[in-house]
């Protein structure tokens, strides 16, 4: 497209936008289980109106927009209240999980340097299942990544003993996920916390996908192990508002155990021509709408609303598990939140993926072990039976060879 010589009127452009969207994944009807978190039309309306209300304002200017500065503080305070942040804990809003993780890694690195460590070469220790955002951050900062295989007991949890062996004097961070993205499994954060304290290493908990889910699941009685600042070794956390916080996209939180640790995050520079400009995170300009929408949705839902929605997601996952069991699938590990990966002993997951896609479902896969992958939203309560019926049909299709090439999967993964 070339920039049109003359502009067009809004109704015409709006119609073009609608027609462009017509070919996209049909997430509103619940047939998408990746990328979008569908908490219902009422939440979507709150997101939109609250976003629009501060869309032009800029979080870069807390003096010009004390409203945004206060809303961000409120969001962080609500986050820390949920995640057992101690009195001195603090944090900031970022544009997303990748941003939160990048800033946590940078902060841990600068903290280590302030202690006279890792000045030449730094490394971070990740379980194999940790999000690739850590590798991106490490790539940007020339940090070595040590990915450590998971436990071999079928739990798909991080292996603290093996991670401990990889720690050396240049290690600036160890990571646990709550839960990880590929399998939806919460790593043994207490064991990692003990290890981190023993070794004197910073432990980051990546709760991007679970930070605004796990606390409510626990209130509902789900077996959620300690995973947040309640565990003494945890120095920082990432938790995405634009996932199970049901906020508009462009909203995450990065949290630190203390003001002192946090103080290694903001950036400041006297030596340029412009006005002083201290920024807490990677961004300069920060969309006000992302802040106001997160603040509004949190206040709209409250503990009660989140408990209801997350209860619905857990319930849906259990219904799904029952159906999967009936169809002969095996679930990867024991997920307790809204992410689930599963595979069939006789049918290749990627062939099944193709069949389920042909039936109108936009879902995802996990590579290790080859599995189908779903990220469940409250909306999926309405469609889980339809999904299972289509999955059964997909199994039949793959079994009878309709699906073309169907390599037989090796069903055992340790
Ligand atoms: C989504 C996710 C991230 C990255 O978050 P973005 O908002 O996509 O940048 C990091 N870690 C985990 C566990 C995630 O699920």
Image (spheres, rainbow, N blue to C red):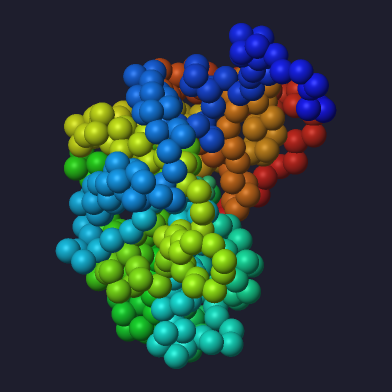
Horizontal placement of 83 versus 360: left or right? left
Relative vertical location of residue 95 with respect to residue 198 in this rendering, above or below:
above
**Residue 353 at x, y = what percent?**
65, 32
Does the rendering let one see residue 352?
Answer: yes
| Quadrant of the image occupied by residue 3 | top right
Residue at 40% of width from left, 72% of height from top?
A: 264
Q: Which quadrant: the N terminus?
A: top right
Relative vertical location of residue 372 with respect to residue 154 in this rendering, above or below:
above
Residue at 41% of width from left, 78% of height from top?
A: 111
**Residue 326 at x, y = what percent?**
46, 29
| Residue placed most toward the observer, 224 or 397 | 224
Labels in figure, total: 0
Relative vertical location of residue 126 with respect to residue 328 in this rendering, above or below:
below
| Residue placed most toward the observer, 181 or 7 | 7
**Residue 256 at x, y = what percent?**
32, 64
**Residue 91 at x, y = what percent?**
33, 59
Horizontal placement of 210 versus 71: left or right? right
């Amino acid at each position: 497209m070339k920039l049109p010589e003359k502009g067009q009127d809004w109704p015409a452009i709006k119609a073009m936008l609608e027609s462009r969207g017509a070919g996209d994944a049909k997430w509103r009807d619940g047939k998408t289980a990746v990328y979008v978190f569908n908490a219902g039309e009422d939440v979507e309306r709150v997101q939109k109106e609250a976003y629009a209300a501060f869309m032009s304002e800029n979080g870069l200017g807390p003096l010009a927009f004390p409203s945004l500065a206060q809303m961000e503080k409120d969001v962080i305070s609500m986050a820390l209240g949920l995640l057992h942040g101690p009195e001195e804990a603090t944090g900031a809003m970022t544009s997303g999980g990748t941003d939160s993780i990048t800033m946590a890694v940078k902060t841990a690195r600068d903290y280590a340097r302030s202690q006279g460590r890792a000045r030449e070469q730094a490394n971070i220790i990740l379980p194999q299942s940790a999000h690739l955002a850590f590798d991106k951050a490490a790539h940007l900062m020339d940090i070595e990544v040590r990915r450590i295989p998971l436990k071999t007991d079928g739990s798909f949890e991080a292996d603290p003993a093996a991670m401990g062996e990889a720690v050396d004097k240049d290690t600036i961070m160890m990571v646990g996920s709550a839960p990880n993205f590929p399998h939806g499994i919460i790593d043994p954060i207490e064991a990692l916390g003990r290890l981190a304290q023993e070794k004197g290493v910073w432990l980051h908990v990546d709760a991007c996908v679970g930070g605004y889910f796990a606390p409510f699941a626990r209130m509902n009685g789900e077996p959620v192990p300690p995973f947040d600042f309640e565990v003494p070794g945890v120095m920082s956390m990432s938790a995405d508002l634009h996932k199970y916080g049901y906020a508009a996209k462009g909203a995450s939180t990065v949290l630190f155990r203390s003001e002192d640790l946090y103080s290694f995050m903001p950036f400041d520079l006297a030596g340029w021509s412009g006005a002083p400009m201290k920024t807490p995170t990677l961004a300069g300009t920060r969309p006000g709408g992302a802040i106001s929408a997160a603040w509004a949705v949190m206040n709209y839902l409250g503990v009660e609303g989140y408990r209801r929605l997350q209860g619905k997601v857990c319930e849906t996952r259990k219904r799904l598990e029952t159906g999967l069991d009936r169809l002969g699938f095996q679930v990867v590990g024991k997920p307790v939140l809204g992410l689930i990966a599963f595979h069939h002993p006789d049918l290749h997951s990627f062939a099944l993926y193709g069949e389920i896609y042909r039936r109108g479902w936009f879902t995802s896969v996990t590579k290790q072990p080859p599995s189908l992958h779903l990220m469940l939203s409250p909306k999926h309560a309405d469609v889980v039976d339809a999904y299972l019926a289509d999955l059964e049909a997909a199994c039949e299709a793959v079994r009878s060879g309709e699906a073309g090439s169907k390599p037989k999967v090796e069903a055992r993964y340790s």
